[in-house]
Structures are given as C-alpha cells and as structure tokens.
C-alpha cells in the first residue's frame, strides 16, 4: 500500500503498524530532548553553520531526508521478495510463472529469521506471499525452520480477535486482512470465529480507500465469505477516468481490480507506475493492467526487478528519504537555531505530503511533529496529525509489550507541549553506574514531556557524566548524547570540564566529506540520527 511515501508506510505496517501513529513514532523519536539544566555553563559556540546546506547529502529521491548517507545495498529482504515474486509470476506473453526461480527453503527461512524490521506475523505474511502458487515449498515448513510459526500464528489470531485500539480504521482493516490471509495460508483459518469474519466484512464495506478494501475482500473470499466494497466503489467510475494526479497508482489499481474494469485513462496512468521503486506498487499495478486478459498481459514490458537464483529479491536501490529521518534532521536544525534555513526542497515536500489525501493515517502524527518543529503550516494532513497527537493515550504502565505505543505517545506529548501524563515506569536497570540504552530513552522522553520527578527517580545512583565521556571515547555517539540529555533531565551536575571536552570528543564523528554532518561511530558515513545526537551534545 505504498507510493512515494509508501515504502516507509509499509515498513511501519510490517513492524510498528500496527501500533498505528504512536507505534510508528517509537523508533523515530529516540533521544528527543528540549531540555536545559545543570546550571549555567560557559560553552563554546557550536559548529554547524553549513548544516542546512549539507543536508543535501542526505536528500532522498522523494525529497525527504534519508536515514544515512550510505546507499541502500542490494541484499535480499522479505518485503521485496514477497511482492517481487508476485510481480514476476504474472504471465507476460509466453513468459509464465513457471519461469520464476523456486524459493529455496533454507534461504527463505534464514531471511525470515533475520529480517527483524517486521513482527513475526508480518514476516509470516511475507513468507506466505512469497510462496503463492508454489508446488514444492510450504510456508509452514519455512516458518518452522525459522522458529517463527507459533509466534506468528498467536500474534495474527490475537489481533484478529482484538485489534489494537490505537490503530486507525484503515490500518486495522489492512492488518486484519493480512493476518487472515496468513492464517489461511498456514491452514489455521478455522481458528477465526465467524463473528470476527463478519466484522471484517462490515468494515470493508464501510471503508473508502481501495487498497485495504481490496485486500480484505480477497482475504475473506479465500475463506468463503463474500464482502461487498460498497463505499469504495461509490465514485469508482469518476475516479477511474479522472486525471492521473488525482489518484495514487496503488489506489487506482486497487479500484480497477475491485471494479473489474480498466478504462483507457486508468491504463495510461498505470503504465508509468510499472517502473515504480516499490515492488508492491508494481505488482498491484501489473495485476490491474492484466484485467483485459492475456492480450493485455502480452503488451506489458518486462518487470524492472528480478528474482535471484535462490528465489529471493533484493531491496530496491532507490535511495528514498523517510519522515523518521526527516524529523531527526529537523531536530538537528532546531538545535543549531537554523530552523528558518531548512532546505527549500524539504519544506516544499513536507507541504506536498501534508496536502496529500492518500497519506497513510499512521504518518500524520510524525508529519505534524516535523512541521511543528519547523513552525510550518503543512496542510490538512498535518493539522489532523496534531489533533490526533493530543488524543494519543499513554498506557498507565510501561511494559515490554506496549513500549512502542508508550514511547510514541510520550514523545508526541513532548513535541507539542501537552504535559506529563501519569504513568508507572520502571527502567530495565543499570550496567554498573550506567543506564542501559532503553533506560536512557525512557528518562529523556519522560523529562521532555514534563515528568521530571520520575526522570530524577530513575537516574538515582547513575553517573551519567561518566557514561557520556565513556561512550564518546568508546565510539558511540548516540549513547553519549542520550546520557548527557538524561543528566540534564535529572538535574545532575554537568561540570564545565565536560562541556569543554565535548567539541574535541565529538570532532572525530564528523563525516569526512560533509563535516557538519555526523556519523554514529568514528569514520562512518553520516546519518540523520547521529547528526541530531551530535548537535544535542554541542547545543
């Protein structure tokens, strides 16, 4: 379900999705700090005069900031393997599915085991998609070898029975459709009650966005339940003949498949999307373009991707930026008081994203936070995100199971100045007098959100100044930055000697080619997160 921003969106849906807006923020906002403390100190003027200009080195093909200056490699991944194989299996003239290399059990199992961006149920979903129509390889066997089957089945069934209350309606619909399809693939659809299926069919009828509706209709059809895409088809004739810019390629393709028709306008709009950098988009578009049958299929160009001999598909080489990395870059700009110098390509893109009615709902809060930090008016989607941020519920107790949701909600409250919400927190503990990385994250976001008493309690006995020095000397810029922010958050005394040392210690983390950008370890390539961390140390 991706176009442009959809590569990031799908990542959320595969891993964090499914804690919707709050969960999507969790990994994005580690280390947020807007604090001052520890008493007045005399600090040298921070570097970074050319930071805004050097962000061009992190500019993605979609005009958002990339997470790292390092180009994305060509290693295989589950997501492109799933949709790349589906794309390649669509017949094209004399070429048919039999010519697609069979996935090797060992290779696919190893990929499922190590592709940790996704939860077990989402990894199982991509394994099932990868093996669609396979006569020799069974998804259950692959997942057993990967050690994921039981966890995947448990997660999928639990979500179908009780969807996450923080998920928006479309995220919930797409997730339930995917997990029903996964349980069907694994022969476990009999564990899904008829009530759950009826609710999914009802929600599919009420939803307007074609892509999740299509997936829900197809998942239900596979278990013998007919679902009518009532609302999604209400304006289908007009939408399928409208200007290409009015409807994203994925939504147009899904609508054509739901409507079982391919008007010439839609066909011409979709043909250009066959070169999209996202495998899911290309697969869905190619499906829609074959609505006319074998004759239509024979007219299509060959897929731009390729399936390796072991049956896996490599990541797209397209270097795309993300909202997560963009938010980190924006925090670096504000730490150096350069928010008014944000690159024009970035502010224009944020405005475009904020005006995109097809923006995934789980992106809205992070977009709103980014625009808020820059004091930009980014359009109606950002405004919705700001309202949604105010409604995010902070769990009353932080647990391992809800930490993404908890962290995302607290970080949103910190960004918008919404104040501290009562929540029970115990840190994972100390390593001697040092806090664990997760404990540092917790302390800093608590303090940022105004929960300073808890921050002080959780850092009692920790020597955060020593941890900052040690991390900088040992080559971990992110830990050093978080430790110093935690020291400030808990009102620990930060001696002038440390402030005097920081510029020298941080110097070796500079990117060789772009010295106002920073790497997470000495000699590495610059990243958005490390650059943010550096300027929080130097601010």
Image (tube, rainbow, N blue to C red):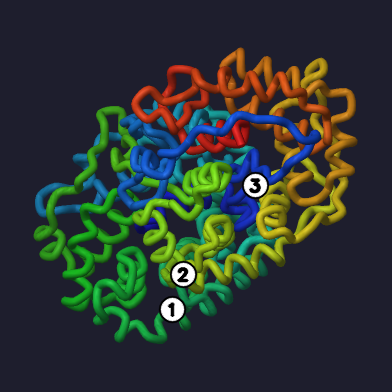
Upstream in the sequence, badge 3 or badge 1? Answer: 3
Helix, strand or loop for disc 1: loop
- Calculate the distance from the C-alpha at mark 3 to the C-alpha at mark 1: 28 Å
Of 369 and 141, nearer the camera is 369
Quote the CA–CA distance across marks 1 and 2: 7 Å
Which label sits on residue 191? none
Percent x, y of residue 300: 13, 57
Give left or right: position of 385 versus 165: left
| Element on which disc 3 rests | helix
Residue corresponding to mark 1: 232
Is 539 rendered above or below residue 461? Answer: below
Q: Are marks 1 and 2 in contact (CB under 8 Å)?
A: yes
Q: Residue at label 2?
A: 213
Q: Residue at x 32, y 35 (%)?
A: 314
> In terms of sequence position, does the residue under pointer 2 or pointer 3 come before the other?
3
Find numbered disc 2 in the image and state the secondary structure of the residue it sits on.
Answer: helix
Asked if the residues shown at circle 2 and circle 3 are in contact, with their CB atoms under 8 angstroms apart, the answer is no
Q: Is residue 195 above or below residue 20?
A: below
Q: Residues within 10 Å of mark 1 (few under 14, many from 20)?
A: many
> Which of the marked residues, 1 or 2, is nearer the chain's N terminus?
2
Q: How many marks?
A: 3
Q: Residues within 10 Å of mark 2 (few under 14, many from 20)?
A: many
| Residue drawn at the location 48% of the way across and 51% of the way down | 323
- The image shows residue 506 at horizontal and vertical percentages of 55, 22
Q: Which residue is mark 3?
A: 155
To which quarter of the image does residue 159 belong? bottom right
Spot occupied by residue 352 in the image (x, y as percentages of width and height): 39, 65
* Quarter of the figure with the C terminus: top right
């Amino acid at each position: 379900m991706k176009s442009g921003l959809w590569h990031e969106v799908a990542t959320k849906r595969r891993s964090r999705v499914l804690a919707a807006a709050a969960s999507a923020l969790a990994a994005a906002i580690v280390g947020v700090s807007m604090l001052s403390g520890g008493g007045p100190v005399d600090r040298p003027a921070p570097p970074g005069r050319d930071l805004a200009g050097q962000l061009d080195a992190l500019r993605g093909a979609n005009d958002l900031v990339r997470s790292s200056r390092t180009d994305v490699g060509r290693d295989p991944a589950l997501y492109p393997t799933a949709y790349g194989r589906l794309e390649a299996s669509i017949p094209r003239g004399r070429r048919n599915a039999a010519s697609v290399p069979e996935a090797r059990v060992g290779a696919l199992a190893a990929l499922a085991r190590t592709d940790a961006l996704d939860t077990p149920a989402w990894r199982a979903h991509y394994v099932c998609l990868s093996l669609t129509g396979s006569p020799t390889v069974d998804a259950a066997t692959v997942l057993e070898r990967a050690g994921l089957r039981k966890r995947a089945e448990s997660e999928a069934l639990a979500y179908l029975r009780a969807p996450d209350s923080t998920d928006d309606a479309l995220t919930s619909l797409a997730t339930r459709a995917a997990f029903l399809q996964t349980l069907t693939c694994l022969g476990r659809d009999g564990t899904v009650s008829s009530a759950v299926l009826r609710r999914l069919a009802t929600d599919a009828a009420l939803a307007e966005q074609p892509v999740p509706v299509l997936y829900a209709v197809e998942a239900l059809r596979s278990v013998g339940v007919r679902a009518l895409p009532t609302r999604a088809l209400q304006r289908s004739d007009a939408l399928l003949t409208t200007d290409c810019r009015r409807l994203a390629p994925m939504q147009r393709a899904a609508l054509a498949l739901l409507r079982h028709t391919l008007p010439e306008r839609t066909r011409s709009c979709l043909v250009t999307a066959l070169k999209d950098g996202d495998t899911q988009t290309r697969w869905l578009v190619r499906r829609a373009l074959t609505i006319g049958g074998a004759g239509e299929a024979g007219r299509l160009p060959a897929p731009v991707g390729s399936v390796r001999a072991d049956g896996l598909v490599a990541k797209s080489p397209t270097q795309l930026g993300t909202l997560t990395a963009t938010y980190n870059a924006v925090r670096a700009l504000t730490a150096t008081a350069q928010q008014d110098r944000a690159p024009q390509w970035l502010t224009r893109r944020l405005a475009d994203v904020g005006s995109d009615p097809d923006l995934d709902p789980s992106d809205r809060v992070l977009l709103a936070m980014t625009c808020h930090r820059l004091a930009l008016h980014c359009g109606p989607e950002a405004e919705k995100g700001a309202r949604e941020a105010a409604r995010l519920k902070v769990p009353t107790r932080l647990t391992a199971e809800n930490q993404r949701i908890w962290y995302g909600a607290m970080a949103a409250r910190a960004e918008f100045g919404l104040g501290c919400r009562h929540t029970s927190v115990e840190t994972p503990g100390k390593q001697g007098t040092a806090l664990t990385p997760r404990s540092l994250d917790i302390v800093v976001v608590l303090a940022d959100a105004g929960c300073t008493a808890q921050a002080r309690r959780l850092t009692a006995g920790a020597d955060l100044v020593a941890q900052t020095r040690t991390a900088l000397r040992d080559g971990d810029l992110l830990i050093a930055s978080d430790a110093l922010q935690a020291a400030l958050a808990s009102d620990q005394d930060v001696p002038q000697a440390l402030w005097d040392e920081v510029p020298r210690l941080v110097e070796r983390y500079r990117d060789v080619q772009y010295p106002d950008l920073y790497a997470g370890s000495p000699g590495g390539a610059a990243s958005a997160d490390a650059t943010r961390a550096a300027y929080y140390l130097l601010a």
